[in-house]
Image: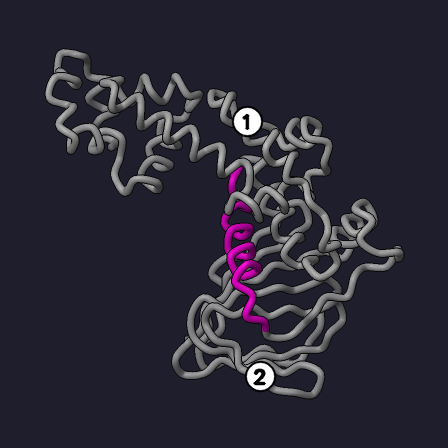
Amino acid sequence: MPLQSSEWFSNKGVECSRVMAKNDAFPRHLHDEYVISANLRGTEEIWMDGKYAQVGAGQVTVYNPATVQSSLFGNDGVEFVSIHLPQSILKDLVVRQNLRNSNQPPTLKEGVLGNRLLFNAIRRFAHKAKAEDAEDQEQELLLLCGALLEDFVPRDSNGDQAVRQVKCYLAENLTIKPQLDTLALLCGLSKYYLIRRFTQLIGMPPLQYHMQLRLQRARDLLRDNVHPLDAALALGFYDQSHFINSFRRMMGVTPYHYVHQLNLGSNKFPITRGNHIKREIAKY
């Protein structure tokens, strides 16, 4: 199988690619942007700064702009996701957040890294970059940048009270999707610091946390014999497929099968309710 890119797309100047390769190579080359890759499967041999290194599954490679690099892919094959991040994005973020006294793009620690936080951030961004939701895209980009700039952030930054404020706001507003600008204004932090600190303390970024709260509330409604379609509408899920897929990811089953397996559905979904209901149930 020759080198092939199964996906290559761009979102607001940030390019992403998913590559599968076997018995092939990238010759020595360079890029004018940061290149951050997550190895999903197999082993890649890289050359950088006159040295060879092995990149295994679960590891990350980071290249600064203009770094000369090459890759070799063996018989077993490899699959990885790469993010091509323009210098201007990290430079502007570093300046806005006062992370260093320089107007130059930062120099990242490069090479092969066993950084699970960065590995997950690459995968999430590559996934969300194709979605239509601009808030999700911005959140994942800031999380990716935060993982890249971890060494530049002062260790004494706190923001615990800001996180508590945002948590309360999210819990009290389950029917609408919050805007990152609104959350940042509420707690007095920049979006970058808010997302970074919230994720550190809570274990997930604020928009993902809010979705979990909404789904937990949906679960409560289903337990109270509320029909899945009505529960979705009550919580602002105007896209039924979004609600169904989100619930399935959390619970492992669709809303309909959840109530059915709890023996709550015997009198909830009468056939006489209408063909449109039967069509919706069929989707589950």
Q: Residues within 10 Å of mark 2 (few under 14, many from 20)?
A: few
Image x and y of residue 36, in percent: 62, 64
SS category of the residue bearing label 1: helix
Q: Is residue 183 above or below residue 194?
A: above
The Cα atoms of the two marked residues, 1 and 2, are separated by: 47 Å
Quadrant of the image occupied by residue 233: top left
Q: Nearer the viewer, residue 204 or 64?
A: 204
Looking at the image, which residue is at 72% across and 38% down? 190
Disc 2 marks a residue whose amino acid type is Ala
Quadrant of the image occupied by residue 261: top left
Q: Is residue 267 above or below residue 187?
A: above
Relative to 282, 97 lies left or right: right
Give the overall secondary structure of the magenta segment. Answer: helix
Residue 168: assigned label = 1
Q: Nearer the viewer, residue 126 or 236?
A: 236
Q: Is residue 52 above or below residue 169?
A: below
Q: Which residue is mark 2?
A: 53
Relative to 94, 82 lies left or right: left
Q: Residues within 10 Å of mark 1 (few under 14, many from 20)?
A: few
Disc 1 marks a residue whose amino acid type is Cys
